[in-house]
Amino acid sequence: MAPSSTRAQVLCLVAACLAVAGCGDAPSSATVPQLQAQLGGAHCRFTYESERCQSRGFNVIDLLVSSEDECDLWAVQCLGTIMSEQSTTVLIRVLDTKRDVETCDGVLPVRSQAVALLGLRADPRAIAPLERLLSSRPKMKLSPGAVGCEPRPEDAGVIEQALGQLRR
């Protein structure tokens, strides 16, 4: 008995999801390179919603709706769920490569989220980069669609708190 057309389509969709996106599997050390690629502008494969990191398949509508800055924030939040030396290294790189984003409707705390996550890890490699960041007093990046506001300085308190946690 041949499967119905609908059943065959569902099986095909599930197989494609498993092959391409992982169907919502929680990230692991094996996904760190994919999250790093997402931070580099690759396909926005991972989202972070309802306090969970989720992988998703390729979706043209998501490409139109999700901004690169949102994808960066989701990648950082997902890296925070992976406790490994490799994920910590990527979070440290975020300090030099990403900034918080002023949208005029709020802030996407891309770098501040990385700072807070590094403060929760007992990895002394983060101390010197955090100290450099604190002394540089960085400003937020202005979102491409932001009109009528100026980029503000990033919150130094988040950096100071992370350093305090690491120095304990």
Image: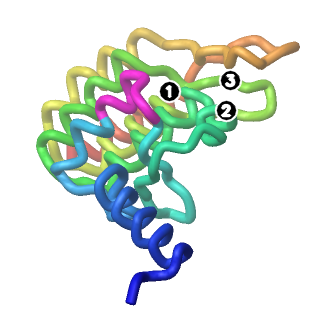
Residue 42 place in picture, x, y as percent: 40, 27
The label on residue 156 is 1
Which label sits on residue 102? 3
Q: Which residues are magenta?
A: 36-43
Q: Residue at x 34, y 63 (%)?
A: 15
The residue tagged with tag 2: helix, strand or loop? helix
Crowding at mark 1 (Cα within 10 Å: few <14, some 14-19, many 20+) = some
* Residue at disc 3, secondary structure: strand
Q: Nearer the viewer, mark 2 or mark 3?
A: 2
Which amino acid type is marked by label 3?
Glu
Mark 2 or 1: in front is 2
Q: Is residue 88 left or right of residue 149?
A: left
Q: Quadrant of the N terminus?
A: bottom left
Q: Depth check: 127 or 92 in front? A: 92
Residue at 32% across, 61% down: 18
Percent of width and height locating residue 70: 57, 36
Closer-to-camera residue (98/133)? 98
Q: Which of the pair 167/60 is nearer the observer?
A: 60
Measured from the top left, where is residue 98 in percent x and y?
A: 44, 21
Give the answer, above or below, for where 150 lies relative to 122: above
Q: Who comes first in sequence, dot 2 or dot 3?
A: 2
Marks 2 and 1 in Cβ contact (< 8 Å): no
Residue lying at the far right of the rendered structure: 148
Q: Is residue 18 above or below residue 44?
A: below
Q: Is residue 89 above or below residue 116?
A: above
N-term-proximal mark, 2 vs 1: 2
Residue at 38% across, 36% down: 115
Query: What residue do we see at 53% from left, 74% from top?
Result: 5
Quadrant assignment, res 147: top right
**Category of crowding for the residue at label 3, using alpha-carbon neighbours closer than 10 angstroms: few (below 14), some (14–19), many (at least 20):** many
Dot placed on the residue nearer the N-terminal end, 3 or 1: 3
Residue under pointer 2: 64
